[in-house]
Structures are given as C-alpha cells and as structure tokens.
Amino acid sequence: MGMRALVTTAAIAWLASVTPLAQTPGPSFEVTSVKANTSRESVMRLTAPLGTGRFDATNASTRILILNAYGLRDFQLAGAPPWTESERFDVAGRAAAAATRDEISAMLRTLLAERFRLRSHRETRELPIYALVAATPDKRLGPALKVSTAETRTRISPTSITAVSMTMARLAVTLSGIVGRVVTDETGLAGGYDMELRFAPEGPLPPAAPPADPDAPSIFTALREQLGLRLDGRRGPVEVLVVDSIERPTPD
C-alpha cells in the first residue's frame, strides 16, 4: 500500500453519471482497534504483511486510510473534510485467517464504513491530466532511454526512476504518482525500454531519504532532456471517489 499523499487537485464540474457505492457489509476484520494519535509526528506508517491477515496504521490520517483502502491517488478523492487530513489515528485490524492484499483492502473499506461512518460514491469528472508524448516529431529517443528485451525490473525513488524493459504505459502510471495527475501514454512507442531518469523531487522528501541534488532538473525538464519525452497538459475524464459523509471514530 502506498504511504505518500500528493497535493489534492481541486474538484471541477463532473461529466458522467454518478455511481453509488454499495454500503452493504463486506469482508471484515475479526478484531479492530482505532485510537487517536496526538504525537504530532510527521511520519505515517502503514503495514500489511503478506499472508498474515494483519493491518496496522500508525499516526495515519483518515485520508491516507481511504486512499489505501480504495487504491486511489490523492487527486481522486473529493469531498473529505479537513480533519481527515489533519487528525491522526492508530488503526489495527486482525483477520480470522491469512488474507491477500486485496482482501485486506476490502476489510479496511468495511472498517471505514463501520468505525468512521464513511459513505461515498464514484463520479467521473473532467480534470487536468497529462499525456506522455514524444518530445520531437521523429520520436527520437533521449540519451537515457534504450530499447530493451530483458526481464522487467524497476526501482523508483522520489528523485529517480531506474528501469529495465519498462513499457511506456507503465511509465505513464509511475509518472502519475509523481506529478499528481492522471498520465496517459500517447507516445506511440511499443515494447520495453531501459531508462535512467533523475529529477528534483516534486514534494518534501521522506525523513530517511538522502538530500536531493540541488542542480537536478524538474521532472518535466528531465523527461525531455534525458528520455526524449514530454508531458502535454490537457483535460480529460478522471474517476474520483466523493465522500458524502464521514464521522470521527469513537476510540476503543
């Protein structure tokens, strides 16, 4: 599960029909605990070890819990009141048996519905997006981008993307988490590519991360100069989760 929230994109007029989310009970933890965390620490920790049926969140905002439960980027969550970001909680869930990540996410959604009284629905809204495109008409590859047929491997940090045989579609998804918008692949480049992309962080670095290179270019400049690609700003349909109502939990 991801732990880092990006700056929220403001909600704009929505396009398509509203799809209500079923509020019927789903899979649930056998034992749960929710307590306020007043430590004022900046770091949030979320863990769900594979095959254990355990979920633990320490110093987590309700917003982060929702994003992880529904598999959303920050810009895909609308209508959440300010306290869901500013107030922190320690949350624990224990399933009756070993569970997959998808099952843990479903149990977390049930916990949010039962303990936080979360009610929500999905909408498709027209929002700013980016299209990943070739930087030049001849689609000339940048110096740090090479065609590859090797086994796929990827390493991502707040200041770099190092990959072997990464597709452009996968790069677009990865960039979405960095720039805080949906990114679509419109490069027309098929197959996998080796790449070394270095850039300045788009937000604050995690406490344990090494300091950023003060001379590193922005992600936009790095894409153009290093990979021969660019992000073209547009507007397009984005599915968002809209919070209809939510309450502070009663601690136990």
Image (tube, grey):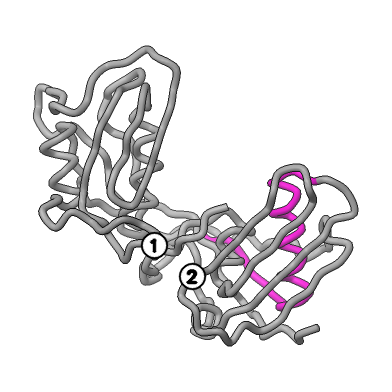
Q: Name which residue lies at 61% across and 76% down.
A: 244
Percent of width and height locating residue 160:
29, 44
Is residue 225 found left or right of 242 in the rendered image?
left
Q: Is residue 120 magenta?
A: yes
Q: Is residue 122 magenta?
A: yes
Q: Name which residue lies at 33% across and 30% down.
A: 168
The amino acid sitting under disc 1 is Pro
Is residue 86 found left or right of 62 in the rendered image?
left
Percent of width and height locating residue 17:
54, 59
The amino acid sitting under disc 2 is Val
For disc 2, the marked residue is 43
Percent of width and height locating residue 98:
83, 45
Is residue 11 found left or right of 94 in the rendered image?
left
N-terminal label among 1 and 2: 2
For mark 1, does the 10 Å Cα neighbourhood hold few (<14), some (14 to 19), or many (20 or more) residues? Answer: few
Which numbered circle lies on residue 72?
A: none
Looking at the image, residue 163 lies above or below residue 180: above
Q: Quadrant of residue 196?
A: top left
For disc 1, the marked residue is 206
Q: Name which residue lies at 32% across and 34% down.
A: 162
Name the magenta segment's main secondary structure: helix
The boundaries of the magenta stretch are: 99-123
Looking at the image, residue 130 lies above or below residue 26: above
Q: Quadrant of residue 148?
A: top left
Which secondary structure, mark 2?
loop
**Dot 1 and dot 2 residues touching (CB under 8 Å):** yes
